[in-house]
């Protein structure tokens, strides 16, 4: 990873949708960013309330009062982070001043195909002219493009955990592109902070369940990135599960080896691909990643194992869904578009236990 020299400039930013989990995580990370001043925080339903009232754990951070998007003055702001619900961000982006650098954490600009967007999200894209300029922000694999854009579509948490182990292997031709099974598990915060019966404690605790089976909206996002890496269409078998924990994504990925490739070849290739990456760690052979090893951090841990079935291997990837899977990767991308050292404000080690 190429580092830039330290920069002393201050960049005023806004966080739209600051009352959600990713909004709170953005505040937590940006509060210690030496080049950022949080100039605006919005939450239409909680407008007029102090952030410390909505999130008491942020009571020590000097922040403006929450406002509605329509009442926010963007003239003195240079960049905005959007933690808004899917389907609403595109209309907001279309109305924002053209000078803003936009870091979007929703799914609204992730799919390049407008037809695919309509198929998976149930309506026409409402800002197609902006979709054309969006760059998919899987940071370690799109740095140069991210630096040149002012609209970054930050990846989803499941796609990040799924693609980080697979992209280098598909590029190297070491695995079969038509036999990829992704079994992924997420903490409850991945479902957002809105009140939902399915997220009640009694519905989630002491159990685990699969959802979105064979039709989860992250599947086309994963396939888009993997197809780019493979140079041709890739289809995956992707099944997400909800776990009774607050944070974390664990993706267990089953692959068929190509030609004479071995699990050791996969491990060596991933180790080379990420050798210079600050946030991606390929673990020693035989060591499995765990969500408790990345909690609260922007790190991505990858393990590689030979399968007991001949010609197959198992990949395991762990990230924090709210950090590397959302707010942390957005800050990483913000640093790139702003000409700042990429790891700024993201160096904190994981929380354990």
Image (cartoon, grey):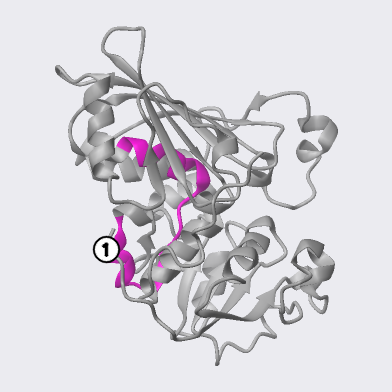
Please provide percent x and percent y for residue 57: 77, 62
**Dot 1 lies on which element?**
loop
- Residue drawn at 39 percent across, 65 percent down: 342
The part of the image, by quadrant, that contains residue 28 is bottom right
Please provide percent x and percent y for residue 311: 26, 12
Q: Quadrant of the C terminus?
A: top right
The part of the image, by quadrant, that contains residue 46 is bottom right
> Is 55 left, or right, of 81 in this rendering?
right
Q: Quadrant of the N terminus?
A: bottom left
* Of the pair 266 and 32, the residue shown nearer to us: 32
Residue 194 in the image: above or below residue 196: below
Q: What residue span does the magenta drawing correspond to?
A: 142-166
Please provide percent x and percent y for residue 253: 41, 26
Please provide percent x and percent y for residue 69: 66, 78
Residue 202 in the image: above or below residue 149: above
Q: Please check the rendered image and state whether residue 176 is part of the magenta-colored stretch, yes or no.
A: no
Neighbourhood count class around disc 1 (C-alpha, 10 Å): few under 14, some 14–19, many 20 upward: few
- Residue drawn at 51 percent across, 73 percent down: 93
Residue 296 in the image: above or below residue 158: below
Residue at which label 1 appears: 2
Q: Please check the rendered image and state whether residue 158 is part of the magenta-colored stretch, yes or no.
A: yes
Magenta segment, prevailing SS (helix, strand or loop): helix
* Of the pair 275 and 79, the residue shown nearer to us: 275
| Residue 130 visible in rendering | no
- Residue drawn at 25 percent across, 43 percent down: 273
* Of the pair 268 and 248, the residue shown nearer to us: 268
Q: Residue furthest left?
A: 260
> Is 188 left, or right, of 124 in this rendering?
right
Q: Residue furthest bottom?
A: 75
């Amino acid at each position: 990873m190429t580092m830039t020299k330290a920069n002393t400039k201050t960049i005023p930013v806004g966080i739209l949708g600051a009352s959600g989990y990713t909004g709170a995580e953005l505040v937590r990370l940006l509060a210690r960013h030496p080049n950022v001043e949080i100039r605006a925080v919005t939450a239409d339903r909680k407008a007029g309330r102090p952030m410390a009232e909505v999130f008491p754990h942020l009571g020590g951070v000097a922040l403006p009062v929450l406002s509605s998007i329509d009442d926010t003055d963007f003239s003195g702001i240079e960049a905005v982070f959007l933690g808004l619900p899917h389907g609403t961000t595109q209309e907001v982006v279309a109305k924002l001043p053209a000078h803003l650098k936009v870091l979007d954490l929703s799914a609204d600009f992730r799919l390049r195909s407008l037809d695919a967007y309509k198929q998976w999200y149930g309506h026409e894209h409402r800002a197609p002219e902006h979709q054309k300029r969006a760059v998919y922000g899987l940071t370690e694999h799109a740095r140069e493009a991210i630096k040149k854009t002012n609209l970054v579509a930050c990846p989803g948490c499941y796609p990040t955990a799924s693609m980080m182990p697979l992209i280098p292997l598909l590029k190297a031709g070491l695995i079969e592109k038509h036999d990829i099974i992704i079994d992924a598990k997420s903490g409850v915060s991945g479902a957002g902070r809105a009140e939902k019966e399915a997220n009640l404690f009694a519905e989630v605790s002491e159990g685990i369940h699969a959802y979105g089976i064979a039709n989860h909206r992250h599947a086309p996002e994963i396939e888009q990135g993997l197809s780019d890496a493979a140079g041709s269409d890739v289809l995956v078998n992707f099944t997400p599960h909800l776990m009774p924990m607050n944070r974390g994504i664990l993706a267990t990925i089953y692959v068929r080896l190509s030609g004479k490739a071995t699990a050791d070849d996969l491990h060596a290739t991933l180790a080379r691909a990420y050798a210079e990456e600050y946030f991606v760690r390929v673990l020693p052979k035989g060591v499995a990643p765990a969500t408790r090893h990345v909690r609260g951090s922007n790190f991505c841990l990858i393990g590689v194992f030979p399968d007991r079935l001949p010609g197959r291997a198992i990949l395991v990837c762990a990230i924090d869904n709210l950090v590397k899977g959302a707010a942390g990767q957005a800050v990483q991308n913000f640093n790139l578009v702003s000409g700042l050292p990429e790891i700024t404000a993201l160096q904190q080690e994981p929380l354990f236990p």
